[in-house]
């Protein structure tokens, strides 16, 4: 039942035209016992692989495929048994299929963006092939080895087990009625989803799941092995179990970042494409910085920041709030010098913010550097005279 339901965490798609200046290559890749249909656009130095969910094929990513390919080389493909790819006739591995996509297209390293069960696949692949993944974005994802509630299977009592045997009834409910797939405000998407699924009835042939080989070790116990920048995206109206899985992933993956998208259910990239794309592009902008910070340390990260600023004086690796959060994580972990350097980057990137100076002042105060702490708290007050935290801390520092 769990494997069945992973396939019906539904996502949708709409047709879209790729910018005329871009070339979209299409074709088929040979995999063990079958063929995978793929599309590739863009010519950026970095590559993105878009992985669809357990029901809708690669066209779910239309509103991301066109946007992301303006800066990146983007690949989307139909997984085995979906869209234009071949139906499985023997045991197969989604992890091996994804690996074949990368190797066949000569992609040594990629950012993986996966939805729902596709997000779970992205996690499994990252654990098995960490050298091939530079960043991870998972949307409404589930993680292998983690359980589900009865509410998840019955959609809060709206479905019976017998409903799963009636494919048309099940599809009609999930696409046109289910309160979790889409925010109630986004009902216009439902008819488009229904039209799409009528064109690809093979997507709902769940027998393919019986042939899918599962990972040898569930990901839930191996999440700490993921040492790359990770963004977790959840729609605020998604089913509760998805939030539980998101929490487990966030707790298990070091320094993972979670974003909740308003006015969206399970179909975040379709329901709120502008919000989703902005969050992902911002995340990917900072992914290189975070990856270097996590793997090579603060000195190399500072060097990267300085080199980027020489080319673009306005470049910032992360938003002010995100950088501040990363800095405080280091501060709370007792890595005060690293936190100071991160807060200094934030001051440079956002010199008009009272909060950046306030945070740097706190780090200096913890480090025992009274003079620099006072200097930064005073600068914070110059920008925001009502900063009560800075006023309070300055009083304490003056008493020392």
Image (spheres, rainbow, N blue to C red):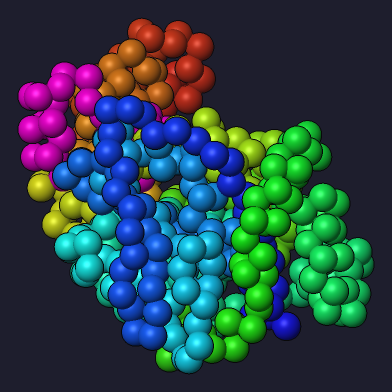
Residue in view at x 49 percent, y 47 percent: 61
Asked if the stretch drawn in magenta spans residue 364, the answer is no
Rendered-image quadrant of the C terminus: top left
| Towards the viewer: 178 or 170 | 170
Horizontal and vertical percent position of residue 337: 20, 46
Q: In this view, does 149 lie to the left or right of 303?
A: right
Q: Is residue 211 left or right of residue 382?
A: right
Check the image and report above or below for 177 versus 101. above
Asked if the stretch drawn in magenta spans residue 324, the answer is yes
Check the image and report above or below for 222 versus 245. below
Check the image and report above or below for 112 versus 165. above
Give the magenta part as a residue range: 301-326
Check the image and report above or below for 315 versus 45. above
| Towards the viewer: 35 or 377 | 35
Residue in view at x 62 percent, y 67 percent: 203
The answer to which image quadrant residue 72 occupies is top left
Query: Could one spot residue 21 in this view of the protein?
Result: yes
| Towards the viewer: 39 or 318 | 39
| Towards the viewer: 396 or 369 | 369
Residue in view at x 22 percent, y 31 percent: 344
Horizontal and vertical percent position of residue 89: 50, 88
Rendered-image quadrant of the N terminus: bottom right
């Amino acid at each position: 039942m769990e494997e069945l339901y992973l396939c019906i965490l539904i996502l949708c798609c709409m047709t879209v035209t790729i910018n005329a200046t871009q070339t979209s290559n299409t074709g088929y890749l040979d995999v063990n016992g079958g063929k995978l249909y793929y599309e590739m656009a863009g010519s950026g130095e970095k590559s993105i692989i878009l992985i669809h969910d357990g029901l809708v094929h690669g066209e779910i990513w239309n509103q991301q495929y066109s946007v992301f390919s303006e800066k990146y080389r983007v690949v989307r493909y139909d997984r085995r048994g979906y869209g234009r790819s071949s139906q499985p006739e023997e045991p197969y591995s989604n992890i091996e299929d994804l690996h074949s996509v990368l190797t066949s297209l000569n992609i040594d390293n990629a950012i993986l963006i996966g939805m729902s069960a596709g997000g779970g696949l992205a996690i499994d692949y990252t654990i098995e092939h960490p050298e091939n993944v530079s960043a991870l974005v998972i949307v409404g994802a589930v993680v292998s080895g983690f359980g589900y509630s009865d509410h998840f299977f019955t959609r809060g009592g709206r479905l019976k087990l017998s409903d799963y045997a009636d494919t048309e009834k099940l599809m009609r409910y999930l696409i046109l009625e289910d309160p979790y797939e889409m925010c109630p405000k986004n009902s216009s998407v439902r008819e488009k989803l229904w039209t799409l699924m009528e064109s690809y009835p093979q997507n709902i042939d769940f027998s393919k799941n019986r042939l899918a080989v599962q990972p040898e070790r569930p990901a839930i116990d191996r999440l700490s092995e993921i040492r790359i920048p990770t963004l977790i995206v959840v729609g605020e109206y998604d089913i509760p179990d998805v939030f539980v899985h998101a929490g487990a992933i966030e707790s298990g993956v070091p320094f993972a970042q979670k974003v909740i998208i308003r006015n969206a259910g399970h179909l975040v990239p379709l329901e709120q494409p502008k919000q989703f794309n902005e969050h992902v592009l911002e995340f990917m902008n900072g992914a290189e910085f975070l990856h270097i910070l996590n793997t090579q340390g603060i000195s190399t990260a500072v060097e990267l920041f300085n080199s980027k600023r020489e080319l673009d004086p306005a470049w910032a690796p992360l938003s002010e709030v995100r950088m501040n959060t990363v800095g405080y994580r280091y501060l709370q972990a007792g890595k005060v010098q690293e936190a100071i350097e991160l807060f200094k980057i934030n001051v440079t990137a956002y010199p008009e913010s009272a909060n950046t100076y306030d945070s740097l002042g706190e780090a200096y105060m913890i480090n025992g550097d009274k003079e620099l702490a006072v200097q930064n708290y005073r600068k914070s007050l110059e920008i925001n005279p009502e900063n009560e935290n800075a006023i309070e801390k300055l009083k304490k520092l003056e008493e020392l």
